[in-house]
Image (cartoon, coloured by chain):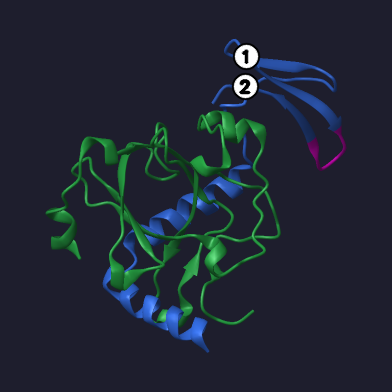
Amino acid sequence: MADFFKDLVYSKEDIIAFPSGLPGFEKNKTFVLVQIPEYLPFEWLVCVDGSRLRFAIVNPLTFRTDYTPAMTKGHLEDLAIEKPEDILLYSIVTIAENPMDSTANLLGPVIINKTKRLGKQIIFDDDRYSTQEPILRSR
Amino acid sequence: MLVLTRKLGESIRIGDDIVVKVVELDSRHVKLGIEAPRSVSVNRQEIYERIQNENKAASESKDQNLKNVADAFRKNKTR
């Protein structure tokens, strides 16, 4: 994997700006989305500032069809979202040794405006969701 | 750390557009009202830390295992 991302080819238009980084990674502000067929529905959010930072991500609706994060008008404005089609919704995945134990962060989803190439991790104060929701274990 | 004493109903102002007001008090809890621009995210510290810690754990998790997770996911779906 490491080598794969080292030689990653992308264009300027692919870059998604995270103006405030992500909590814990406030200095990492530029990322690209990478899809590799055999990993789908999982994708990668790869930092392109020279660091080796990357996150496995997944659209949480693929395993939690009832997921409804409480987005506010402020969140949408923050990301300059004008229409629902602008939005990409992801959860960051923590990959476990045993694949069945892997989890996704539903408390802090990553929202991307794919038109404006702008992203942010939004923190919800919502006890319906946790930072470690099982992806594979049946609920 | 700057420490200020405030009474019930009093506020402090941070910069030009953030106001924190003491709304309710009892012996163990303080209820704070916060006025801030929408672009400023306001979170309880422990929630912010939970996200921070999970991001760190995720960034250090073994990405070569994701292939197995993807395979298991697809098997799960078709079952």
In the rendered image, is residue A28 in sight?
no
Please tell me which residue is depicted at 82% across the width and 20% down the height of the picture.
B7
Front residue of B21/A91: it is: A91
In this view, B11 is above or below B39 = above
Q: Is residue A119 left or right of residue A73?
A: left
Question: Callout 1: few (<14), some (14-19), or many (20+) C-alpha neighbours within 10 Å?
Answer: few
The span shown in magenta is B25-30
Q: What amino acid is found at the position of numbered circle 1 in the picture?
A: Asp
Give the residue pinned by disc 2.
Answer: B37
Please tell me which residue is depicted at 58% across the width and 45% down the height of the picture.
A123
Q: In this view, does A123 lie to the left or right of A98?
A: right
Q: Which element carries disc 1, helix, strand or loop?
A: loop
Q: Residue furthest bottom?
A: B79
Chain A colour is: green
Indicate which disc residue B17 carries.
1
In this view, B1 is above or below A98 = above
| Residue A117 percent coordinates (x, y) | 38, 36
Q: Which of marks 2 and 1 is in front?
A: 2
Q: Does the magenta stretch include residue A126?
A: no
* Quarter of the figure with residue A77: top right
Q: Is residue A9 left or right of residue A27?
A: left
Which chain corresponds to the colour blue? B
Of helix, strand and loop, which mostly describes the magenta segment? loop
Question: Could you give the CA–CA distance between mark 2 and mark 1, rounded to whole angstroms?
Answer: 7 Å
* Quarter of the figure with residue A137: bottom right
Front residue of A68/B49: it is: A68
Please tell me which residue is depicted at 50% across the width and 85% down the height of the picture.
B78
Q: Which element carries disc 2, helix, strand or loop?
A: loop
